[in-house]
Amino acid sequence: MGKTDWKAEARALKKKLRKLLDKGAEAPAVPKKAKPVSPLAPASFPALPRIKGVEFAAVEAGVRYHNRKDVMLVRLAPGTAMAGVFTRSTTRSACVRDCQTKLAMKVADGAGAAIIVNSGNSNAFTGKVGDDAVAAVTGSVATALGIPASRVFSSSTGVIGEPLPHDRITAKVPALAAALTEAAIEGAAQAIMTTDTFPKGAAATVQGEGGVINIAGIAKGSGMIAPDMATMLVYIFTDAKISAANLQKMVSRNVGATFNSITVDSDTSTSDTLLIAATGQSAAAEVKGAVAKAFETALHGVMRNLALQVVRDGEGATKLVEVRVTGAASDEDAAKVAFAIANSPLVKTAVAGQDPNWGRIVMAVGKSGAQADRDKLTIRFGDILVAQNGWRSPDYKEEDGAAYMLQPELVLAVDLGLGKAKRSVWTCDLTNRYIEINADYRS
């Protein structure tokens, strides 16, 4: 039997298995081949500080995956301030629309909050059935934790267009509520993974007036990564005393240079969500003045760290690439050129093949729609001057470019020579593994 026939038969068997599981049959113990971890992954999950007023739990609910945790719950202390940013997709999920509605509501003083997330099913493009699923899940959490349903925020990530089997989630809510603890953030990070190869976490501390302020965040994302935002879920927690309005301003100011400056495949998800919660339980005074600036800088660092981890885990990625554009006539033009290069399949495959094909960068600049002048354009690989004045640099040697491309982290720099605007965007290479992951994603 040929390879193609074997794969087709495997897909058919998996579909039969899912039907049996939907009917309540137990999953047989089938050994699975371990998923290869990205070569760009950090050595381990970081040690994140416990955030006072934040508790986590994660369970196996069998939403789509089996023998792994796929639902996580976060309980947030009374008085927690919430803020968030979301995908601008016109086909955004039921969860995203529900979160946006709830964040716009007036909040009673001292209200608690919660976040519940499932992986395996995005509950997107599921019509009223999807809305009903969100109501059922958030309502179940509200009852279990004794908080208003309007303060329960949910996210779903995974396959689009399939009804969410929300009864599998609600059945696990009592167990989740009973297991809540400040120490379980790593398990929460694992439960929200889909095609991710490693859980993602980052943290920072700030010296406030009268005490230390802690920030800790987790994220998931590997494919369908592109602004706005770049499928990606992010949850950041802090014990800072800060109003929801000020928190929202800080997140909105910093999303552009972090999560909206990464791209794996130029595809914007239906489910992108960033929620940030501030419990106000640090001993430090309210965030303001110089402390506010330090806090925002630290928050930016956590957001950037998580964003770059998403790119490092790009489906099939072997290279982390910064596209650094300077000298543009406008901010808009700088972004156009940066994303044209970062999203070019020809550039990304050249990087995968470790080929210093700088002509593909020239092509991407030209197609971007931004103002450009051949004779003012400069291209560099890191510190290596490749081209300038409308032609290859006379000092450039192909072997130098080839040696540079062997590195796991690269900078492709373009100066347009037309102004002062600049933009950096991070991407990864495009390999055969990306095709394998996405060709078999639902099988």
Image (cartoon, grey):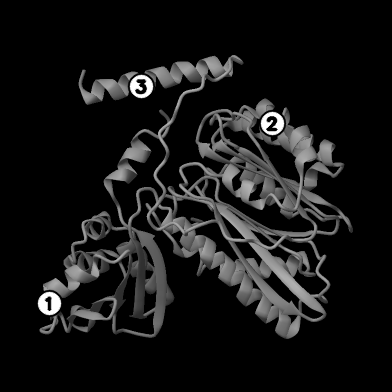
Residue type highlighted by circle 3: Ala
Quadrant in the picture for the C terminus: top left
- Lateral position of residue 171 relative to residue 408, left or right: right
Question: Is residue 349 at least partly visible in the picture?
Answer: yes
Q: Earlier in the sequence, mark 2 or mark 1?
A: 2
What residue do we see at 50% from left, 35% from top?
160
Q: Residues within 10 Å of mark 3 (few under 14, many from 20)?
A: few
Q: Alpha carbon of mark 3 to alpha carbon of mark 1: how far? A: 49 Å
- The disc, 3 or 2, on the residue closer to the chain's N-terminal end is 3
Tell me where residue 435 sits by quadrant.
Answer: top left
Residue at image mark 1: 397
Q: Secondary structure at mark 3?
A: helix
Residue at 55% across, 50% down: 272
Instruction: Identify the element where label 2 is drawn.
Output: helix
Q: Nearer the viewer, mark 2 or mark 1?
A: 1
When the figure is inspected, residue 373 is found, relative to residue 361, above or below; the finding is below
> Residue tagged by mark 3?
10
Q: Residue at x 67, y 81 (%)?
A: 293
Mark 1 surroundings within 10 Å by alpha-carbon count, few (fewer than 14), some (14 through 19), many (20 or more): few
Sequence-wise, the earlier of marks 3 and 1 is 3
Amino acid type of the residue that numbered disc 2 sits on in the rendered structure? Asp
Coordinates of residue 208 in the picture (x, y in percent):
76, 79
Residue 440's tag is none
Are the residues tagged 3 and 1 within 8 Å (C-beta)? no
What is the number of the mark on residue 132? 2
- Left/right placement of residue 302 relative to residue 266 reads right
- Residue 253 visible in image: no
CA neighbours of label 2 inside 10 A, class few (<14), some (14 to 19), many (20+): some
Image coordinates for residue 256, horizontal then vertical, percent: 52, 67
3D distance between C-alphas at marks 3 and 2: 34 Å
Residue 124, relative to residue 363: is it above or below? above
